[in-house]
Image (cartoon, helix red, strand yellow):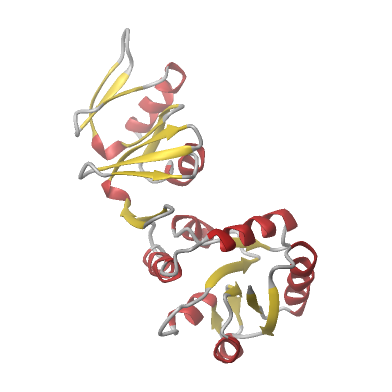
């Protein structure tokens, strides 16, 4: 896969090139650029399949570079030294990112995802959701083998673990199966009105109709589902509702 690196730091470009050569020989670096302006020129000249893109550069951001393109016919991975809000936006947008200094094993994982992706429209959808989430997280991308879903968080009723998969139950009755674990989604969603009430269940608090404690501990959801609350999560559940 032909790739380019757009990063204003010489050390960043050189270290990534070395790591790719050593651990990901299937990636061929066909050019590098140190700014948004030069990056756009390089994109026209090389037509890469993959772009490793820094966020903050002297003449703009990686977001602005992508937004200025009429079409995005390549996959992209953000490379950043900033572990901040943007990281959460990446996670919800299904965008791969690497934190500087780059960990070689995480780089290998990111490249494996690139090779397994067959959805040519995903980069465009990723950018749209990334921009929408830039001010406030509202949407989540769920990419399956056959389809990419863009889901409003307000439409997710609950998530359920199914071994290493997660089943999303939506307001309209739709079910979507993701290859990510419930633990991964819990880490993303629990700060956004969602609560893990059981090892297998993550619910949207907005859909709680009622709850009961006794012989059985459970919540009743607006879609009439009855979901168990584990005993060890009972206190956390009550504290969340009271907050």
Q: Position of residue 206 (x, y in %)?
A: 26, 39
In-front residue for pair 59/200: 200
Q: Position of residue 230 (x, y in %)?
A: 42, 20
Tell me what residue is drawn at x 23 percent, y 43 percent.
171
In-front residue for pair 191/207: 207
Q: Using the image, determine if residue 234 lies above or below residue 88.
A: above
In-front residue for pair 168/87: 168
Q: Using the image, determine if residue 131 lies above or below residue 84.
A: below
Name the quadrant containing residue 60.
bottom right
Q: Using the image, determine if residue 2 lies above or below residue 130.
A: below
Tell me what residue is drawn at x 68 percent, y 83 percent.
32
Q: Position of residue 72 (x, y in %)?
A: 46, 78
Name the quadrant containing residue 135.
bottom left
Quadrant holding the N terminus = bottom right
Left or right of 8? Residue 218 is left
Tell me what residue is drawn at x 49 percent, y 44 percent.
180
Name the quadrant containing residue 213.
top left
**Numbered label tally:** 0
Judged from this view, the residue extending furthest toward the top is: 215
Q: Using the image, determine if residue 71 lies above or below residue 44.
A: above
Left or right of 192? Residue 82 is right
Left or right of 42? Residue 234 is left
Quadrant holding the C terminus = top left
Left or right of 18? Residue 173 is left
Q: Position of residue 28 (x, y in %)?
A: 70, 75
């Amino acid at each position: 896969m032909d790739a380019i690196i757009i990063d204003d730091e010489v050390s960043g470009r050189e270290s990534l090139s070395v790591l790719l050569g050593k651990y990901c020989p299937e990636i061929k670096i066909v050019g590098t650029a140190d700014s948004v302006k030069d990056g756009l020129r390089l994109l026209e000249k090389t037509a890469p399949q993959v772009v490793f893109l820094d966020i903050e550069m002297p003449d703009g951001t990686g977001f602005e570079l992508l937004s200025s393109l009429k079409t995005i016919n390549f996959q992209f991975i953000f490379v950043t030294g900033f572990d901040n809000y943007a990281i959460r936006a990446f996670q919800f947008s299904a965008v791969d990112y690497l934190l500087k200094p780059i960990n070689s094993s995480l780089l290998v994982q990111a490249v494996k995802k690139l090779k397994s992706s067959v959805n040519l429209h995903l980069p465009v959808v990723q950018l749209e959701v990334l921009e929408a989430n830039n001010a406030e997280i509202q949407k989540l991308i769920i990419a399956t083998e056959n389809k990419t879903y863009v889901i409003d968080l307000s439409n997710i009723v609950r998530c359920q673990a199914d071994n290493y998969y997660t089943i999303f139950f939506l307001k309209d009755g739709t079910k979507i199966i993701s290859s990510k674990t419930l633990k991964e989604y819990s880490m993303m969603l629990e700060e956004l009105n969602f609560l893990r009430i059981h090892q297998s269940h993550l619910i949207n608090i907005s859909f709680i109709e009622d709850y009961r404690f006794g012989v059985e501990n459970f919540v009743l959801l607006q879609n009439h589902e009855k979901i168990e609350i584990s005993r060890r999560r009972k206190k956390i559940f009550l504290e969340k509702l009271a907050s």
